[in-house]
């Protein structure tokens, strides 16, 4: 008996060892995508002459925009029946909570932002120093905030609210002298089985969201574009006074599809700006062949540039870690200092800061967003000269103590002192000319400075004149 057991044990161990040898090795981990600015932006990239002309009409001088993510998801605040709160973006609740189309439709049918006041929103933005506004006309959930003849899945036809938010806000913004644009999800539309998901890991959710789909269903993106995507973009550019259209998440977009959308915008609104996410993801490599079809680059979500870029850009930032209003699960807001520093670095790198807020489901602006906008606005009241209408830092490097913007004629530098050094002095080198004066924007008083050849030294007051950013204006 012992002999049999020993023999059997030897056979089993040998078999296991043999199976272990034959077992497939674990797949090697794919290299991380190169998202560096150096990789994404070749130094020889140039925007087309007509795009530059469109930018110069208002966009390059505006610097500060309000982004608004608002829709059915706003009422859920990041969670549905105890599910979905783990996702950082509350506007993705239909996917993160694995809601069927019927479940989400029932929420949409009750969506009633009865306290929405377009004039109040526009005035708040204007008082905060904001120069343009971009709102989600249709996010990835497929629900439209405007009256659409293409689909009744919109706020006018599908909800008790019965009002066209895009129309009301467009008119209110223009009354305040603000430029107005809309976000439109041109590729993703979770309500349309023919539309693609942003990434393959979500593809299985087609069947979760649409459980009645036949097993042999084959999505047809071109059918979705012809049926809904392109006709709704036509409605927006024909029926609303748009200064900008903001496309997003270009999964499966190609040259032919890009041309359809771009040509539609150009047909009705030649001066309307188009962003790069019509074809490039926020952190994707910029391909020169697509530059004729959009006007400026949208970098990654909440991405602050670390270097000057060869193309004019915009950073879609947010006052919080989510874009839609979120109270369920983890969510944080930036401090006023963080928000202002992110804003200043973006402008000094040569772009615009499009800072998002997510209004509440009742239609009121998020009070914390209003407070943060107000902090930036208060600073701009005093220091706006160093932001609006300026150009990027003309020097080679970003200084350790902060950042630099410049006047268009190159005769003035604005030194943004974000971190006061212990020495109570800052220095600049490699200056092309001699400084003639220096003063603080906070109070107009002269700043003590000395210059030896191409090096400038400025002695600072013992206490910063601004809580977040003391600006020294230097004339040359």
Image: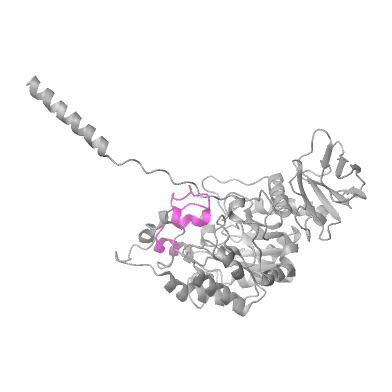
The answer to which of 281 and 159 lies nearer the viewer is 281
Which residue does the image show at 47% across and 59% down from the upper left? 198
Q: Position of residue 210 (x, y in %)?
A: 37, 63
Residue that lies at the very extreme toward the left in this rendered image: 1
Tally the numbered discs.
0
Which residue does the image show at 61% across and 51% down from the upper left? 38
Q: Position of residue 61 (x, y in %)?
A: 75, 63
The answer to which of 397 and 272 lies nearer the viewer is 397
Whether residue 287 is visible: yes
Is 318 left, or right, of 392 in this rendering?
left
In the image, the segment drawn in magenta is 77-106
Q: Position of residue 148 (x, y in %)?
A: 52, 75
The answer to which image quadrant residue 380 occupies is bottom right
Q: Is 89 included in the stretch rendered in magenta?
A: yes
Which residue does the image show at 90% across and 48% down from the upper left? 438
Is 140 left, or right, of 415 in this rendering?
left
Would you place residue 461 above or below residue 261 in this image? above
The answer to which of 317 and 153 lies nearer the viewer is 317
Which residue does the image show at 9% across and 20% down from the upper left? 2
Q: Quadrant of the N terminus?
A: top left
Q: Position of residue 104 (x, y in %)?
A: 44, 61
Would you place residue 175 above or below residue 37 in this image? below
Would you place residue 61 above or below residue 34 in this image? below
Q: Is 379 included in the stretch rendered in magenta?
A: no
The answer to which image quadrant residue 16 occupies is top left
Whether residue 239 is visible: no
Residue that lies at the very extreme toward the top in this rendered image: 2
């Amino acid at each position: 008996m012992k002999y049999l057991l020993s023999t059997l044990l030897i056979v089993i161990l040998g078999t296991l060892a043999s199976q272990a040898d034959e077992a497939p090795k674990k797949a090697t981990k794919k290299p991380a995508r190169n998202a560096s600015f150096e990789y994404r932006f070749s130094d020889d990239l140039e925007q087309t002459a007509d795009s530059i002309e469109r930018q110069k009409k208002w966009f390059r001088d505006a610097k500060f925009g309000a982004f608004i993510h608002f829709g059915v998801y706003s009422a859920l605040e990041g969670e549905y029946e105890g599910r979905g709160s783990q996702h950082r973006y509350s506007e993705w609740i239909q996917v993160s909570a694995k809601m069927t189309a019927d479940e989400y439709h029932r929420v949409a049918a009750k969506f009633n932002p009865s306290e929405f006041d377009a004039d109040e929103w526009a005035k708040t933005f204007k008082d905060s120093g904001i120069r343009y506004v971009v709102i989600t006309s249709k996010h990835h959930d497929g629900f439209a905030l405007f009256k659409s003849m293409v689909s009744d899945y919109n706020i006018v036809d599908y909800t008790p609210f019965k009002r066209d938010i895009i129309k009301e806000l467009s008119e209110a913004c223009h009354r305040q002298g603000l430029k107005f644009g809309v976000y439109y999800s041109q590729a993703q539309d979770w309500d349309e089985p023919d539309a693609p998901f942003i990434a393959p890991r979500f593809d299985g959710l087609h069947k979760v969201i649409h459980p009645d789909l036949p097993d042999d269903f084959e999505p047809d993106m071109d059918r979705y574009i012809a049926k809904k995507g392109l006709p709704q973009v036509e409605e927006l550019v024909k029926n609303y006074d748009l200064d900008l259209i903001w496309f997003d998440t270009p999964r499966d977009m190609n040259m032919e599809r890009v041309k359809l959308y771009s040509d539609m915008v150009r047909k009705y609104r030649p001066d309307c700006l188009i962003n790069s996410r019509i074809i490039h993801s926020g952190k994707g490599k910029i391909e020169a062949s697509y530059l004729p079809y959009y006007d400026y680059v949208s970098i990654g979500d909440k991405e602050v540039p670390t270097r000057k870029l060869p193309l004019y850009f915009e950073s879609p930032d947010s006052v919080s870690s989510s874009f839609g209003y979120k109270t369920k699960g983890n969510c944080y807001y930036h401090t006023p200092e963080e928000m202002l520093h992110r804003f200043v670095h973006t402008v000094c790198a040569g772009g615009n800061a499009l800072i998002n807020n997510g209004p509440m489901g009742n239609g009121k602006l998020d009070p914390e967003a209003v407070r943060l906008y107000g902090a930036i606005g208060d600073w701009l009241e005093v220091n706006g000269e160093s932001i609006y209408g300026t150009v990027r830092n003309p020097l080679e490097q970003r200084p350790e103590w902060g950042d630099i913007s410049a006047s268009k004629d190159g005769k003035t530098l604005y030194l943004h002192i974000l971190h006061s050094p212990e020495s109570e002095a800052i220095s600049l080198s490699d200056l092309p000319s001699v400084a003639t004066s220096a003063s603080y924007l906070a109070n107009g008083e002269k700043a003590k400075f000395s210059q030896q050849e191409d090096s400038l030294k400025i002695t600072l007051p013992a206490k910063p004149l601004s809580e977040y950013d003391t600006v020294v204006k230097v004339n040359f």
